[in-house]
Amino acid sequence: MFPDYIIQTLKEGILDFDKKIKGFANPDSILTAIESRSSSPVRILRDDNLESNIKGLYPCGEGVGYAGGIMTAAVDGIKCAIKILEKDET
Protein backbone atom coordinates (compact mmCIF):
# COMPACT_ATOMS: atom_id res chain seq x y z
CA MET A 1 0.00 0.00 0.00
CA PHE A 2 2.92 2.34 0.65
CA PRO A 3 6.07 3.03 -1.37
CA ASP A 4 9.18 1.17 -0.22
CA TYR A 5 10.76 4.28 1.33
CA ILE A 6 7.77 4.68 3.69
CA ILE A 7 7.75 0.99 4.62
CA GLN A 8 11.48 1.10 5.36
CA THR A 9 11.08 4.26 7.46
CA LEU A 10 8.22 2.67 9.45
CA LYS A 11 10.32 -0.44 10.10
CA GLU A 12 13.25 1.64 11.29
CA GLY A 13 11.01 3.79 13.50
CA ILE A 14 9.38 0.77 15.11
CA LEU A 15 12.74 -0.87 15.81
CA ASP A 16 14.10 2.40 17.22
CA PHE A 17 11.06 2.85 19.46
CA ASP A 18 11.55 -0.73 20.68
CA LYS A 19 14.82 0.47 22.24
CA LYS A 20 12.80 2.87 24.40
CA ILE A 21 9.84 0.58 25.11
CA LYS A 22 10.93 -3.08 25.08
CA GLY A 23 8.43 -5.27 23.31
CA PHE A 24 7.11 -2.51 21.04
CA ALA A 25 8.47 -4.36 18.02
CA ASN A 26 7.14 -7.72 19.16
CA PRO A 27 6.73 -9.98 16.10
CA ASP A 28 3.16 -10.76 17.22
CA SER A 29 2.19 -7.07 17.16
CA ILE A 30 -0.13 -5.83 14.44
CA LEU A 31 0.25 -2.42 12.84
CA THR A 32 -3.36 -1.53 12.20
CA ALA A 33 -3.45 1.99 10.85
CA ILE A 34 -1.74 5.28 10.39
CA GLU A 35 -2.95 8.55 11.85
CA SER A 36 -4.25 11.12 9.45
CA ARG A 37 -5.01 14.77 10.00
CA SER A 38 -8.42 14.67 8.39
CA SER A 39 -11.87 13.53 9.29
CA SER A 40 -13.96 11.41 7.01
CA PRO A 41 -17.61 11.82 6.05
CA VAL A 42 -17.61 8.08 5.36
CA ARG A 43 -18.87 5.44 7.74
CA ILE A 44 -17.86 1.83 7.15
CA LEU A 45 -20.87 -0.24 8.10
CA ARG A 46 -20.53 -2.93 10.73
CA ASP A 47 -22.89 -5.50 12.21
CA ASP A 48 -24.02 -6.07 15.81
CA ASN A 49 -20.64 -7.68 16.52
CA LEU A 50 -18.90 -4.55 15.15
CA GLU A 51 -17.52 -6.55 12.20
CA SER A 52 -17.71 -5.20 8.65
CA ASN A 53 -18.96 -7.14 5.65
CA ILE A 54 -15.33 -8.23 5.22
CA LYS A 55 -14.91 -11.14 7.65
CA GLY A 56 -12.34 -10.36 10.33
CA LEU A 57 -12.30 -6.58 9.69
CA TYR A 58 -13.49 -4.52 12.66
CA PRO A 59 -13.52 -0.86 11.60
CA CYS A 60 -13.32 1.49 14.55
CA GLY A 61 -12.43 5.03 15.49
CA GLU A 62 -12.48 8.36 13.70
CA GLY A 63 -11.39 7.37 10.20
CA VAL A 64 -14.31 5.00 9.72
CA GLY A 65 -16.99 7.24 11.20
CA TYR A 66 -17.48 5.90 14.73
CA ALA A 67 -15.75 8.57 16.79
CA GLY A 68 -15.16 12.29 16.84
CA GLY A 69 -11.95 12.57 18.82
CA ILE A 70 -9.13 10.71 20.47
CA MET A 71 -11.11 9.62 23.55
CA THR A 72 -14.15 8.36 21.65
CA ALA A 73 -11.84 6.64 19.16
CA ALA A 74 -10.09 4.89 22.07
CA VAL A 75 -13.41 3.81 23.57
CA ASP A 76 -14.61 2.53 20.20
CA GLY A 77 -11.38 0.57 19.83
CA ILE A 78 -11.94 -1.01 23.24
CA LYS A 79 -15.51 -1.94 22.26
CA CYS A 80 -14.20 -3.63 19.10
CA ALA A 81 -11.49 -5.45 21.07
CA ILE A 82 -14.10 -6.80 23.48
CA LYS A 83 -16.24 -8.06 20.60
CA ILE A 84 -13.19 -9.80 19.09
CA LEU A 85 -12.36 -11.43 22.43
CA GLU A 86 -15.98 -12.55 22.88
CA LYS A 87 -15.93 -14.05 19.38
CA ASP A 88 -12.72 -15.96 20.15
CA GLU A 89 -14.32 -17.45 23.28
CA THR A 90 -17.05 -19.15 21.29
Image (tube, rainbow, N blue to C red):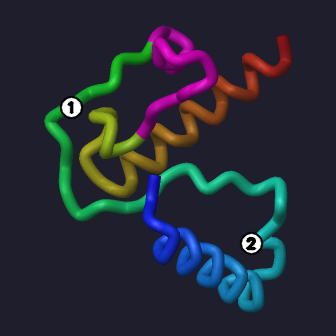
Ranked by sequence position, the earlier of labels 2 and 1 is 2
The residue at the point 61 percent across, 56 percent down is: 31
48 magenta-colored? yes
Q: Residue tagged by mark 2?
A: 24
Q: Which residue is at a point 46% across and 10% down the rendered structure image?
A: 47
Measure how far apart labels 2 and 1 are at the Cα level. Answer: 31 Å
Residue 64: x %, y % from top left: 33, 36
Residue at point 47%, 49% (across, down)? 74
Q: Find numbered disc 2 in the image and state the secondary structure of the residue it sits on.
A: loop
Classified by dominant secondary structure, the portion drawn in magenta counts as loop
Q: Residues within 10 Å of mark 1 (few under 14, many from 20)?
A: few
Q: In the figure, residue 61 lies in which quadrant?
A: top left
Q: Position of residue 57 (x, y in %)?
A: 55, 27
Residue at x-position 55% and y-position 32%: 79
> Are dots 2 and 1 in contact, CB under 8 Å?
no
Measured along the vertical axis of the image, is residue 55 above or below residue 20? above
Q: Residues within 10 Å of mark 2 (few under 14, many from 20)?
A: some
Q: Which percent across, then down, holds residue 62?
A: 32, 45
Instruction: Name which residue type carries label 1.
Output: Val
Along the line of sight, which residue is nearer the eye, 5 or 66?
Answer: 5
- Circle 1 sits on which residue? 42
On the image, the x and y values in percent for residue 82 come to 66, 30
- Give the residues drawn in magenta, as a range: 47-60
